Image (cartoon, rainbow, N blue to C red):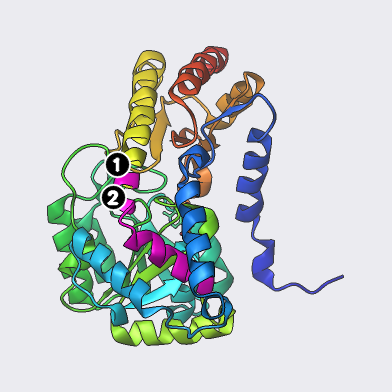
Amino acid sequence: MMQFAKWTNSSQVSITRDILKRTEQPGVISFAGGVPAPELFPADELAHAYTEVLAAEPQSSLQYTTTEGFHPLREALASLMEERGVHCSADDIALVHGSQQALDLVGRLFLEPGDLVLVEETTYHGAVLAFNPLGVRYRAVPTDDHGLKVEALRDLLQEERPKLIYSMPTFHNPSGVSLSHQRRQSLAALVAEFEVPLIEDDAYAELRYEGKQEPPVKAFDQDGRVIYTSTFSKILAPGLRLGWVVAPREVVAKLNIAQMGASFHVGTLLQRVVHNYLSSGGLPSHIKILRSAYRARRDAMLEALDAHMSEVARWTRPEGGFFIWVQLADGLSTRQLLQAALSEKVAFVPGDPFFAAGGGQDNTLRLSFSTATVESIQEGFARLARAVRVVA
Ligand SMILES: Cc1ncc(COP(=O)(O)O)c(C=O)c1O
């Protein structure tokens, strides 16, 4: 028998894997995954960038590079952050293999066995996968339709000393909700007052379909407590594996040391290709295309929910991102509904694995509208309505 480390036995890993496997059967309309729509990837533009970079700099783009990475790319990221409302320079930025790696590395910088991490009531499952090997505990900060309740966080901080707070203030995964301007300011002030580092995970930043853009919490971080991460996964393609962290310099320095141990650096060719793509000026128009396609899907799903589910559930109305969070009426079970839904060949993810600190009830679920077309959303909800009639 292999003597694996204890964390490898964590059951949460297999729960989601199992569900996703069952949703990948032929003919199933799946609202379960959370990946971007592949037909929207800017494949031609990226092919062009790869060709140009390899022709112009074949040797340097294929060589090892420094852990800090390509300075012009980090400068371009600093400009992108400026547009999001955060002033920073290339030296405040660490490159990572996607935000998922940021969670792993930042977790390792701060967390030791037994440490407490505060998370929203429901949280991104990948964060739990990143932090679990470190042997940490979780407590949930209460949330409502406007995200994390900052006053409830204050109460918790008066009671306990967490090592980290992990939050998705914009287009939360799985709930879809976003923090108001006021709450963003208060959250930055609170982590400064209690001197707790906050990981702000901004994976869906640019994918807003209505309403006014809000600055990240990082924009209000005068005390250097916010460690911000974002990614090209949802605005270009997740297969690139490129994300970044904006953090105080001492955090960036330690992140780079951790990155050295993990992988030396993010791929040299990839860094140059993404820099080439950004320099071509194609990103803003690509984001417009994404917004319009995803907006249509979100609207179709909200309409389908209104048409088929209003008597048996209530749900969030996200202004962006990929997800809608649904709470079924009392007495209805998500697991039973999933069984009936899979028989009708439509799928979603039950809500309970998203409750990292426990407390999940068997009447919540997450729907993703990112990969389904408007037609498949309509057909999927006709099937879901039949499944509801079976269990209601
Ligand atoms: C909230 C959130 N954070 C981070 C990630 C990881 O993204 P990346 O592909 O940049 O590692 C995801 C991916 O789904 C996500 O939903």
Residue 225 location (% of width, % of height): 26, 76
Secondary structure at badge 2 equals: helix
Residue name at image x 43 percent, y 80 percent: 69
What amino acid does circle 1 point to?
Lys
Q: What residue did someone put label 1 on?
A: 288
Q: Residues within 10 Å of mark 1 (few under 14, many from 20)?
A: some
Q: In the figure, is residue 212 to the left or right of 258?
A: left
Q: What residue did someone put label 2 on?
A: 284
Q: In the figure, is residue 28 to the left or right of 201?
A: right
Q: Residue furthest left?
A: 182
Residue 325, compared with residue 254, is above or below; it is: above
Which residues fall within the magenta stretch? 268-286
Q: Is mark 2 within 8 Å of ligand 1?
A: no
Residue 168 location (% of width, % of height): 34, 56
Residue 276 inside the magenta-drawn segment:
yes
Residue 77 inside the magenta-drawn segment:
no
The front one of 152 and 83 is: 83
The front one of 142 and 59 is: 59
Residue 214 location (% of width, % of height): 18, 52
Residue name at image x 34 percent, y 39 percent: 289
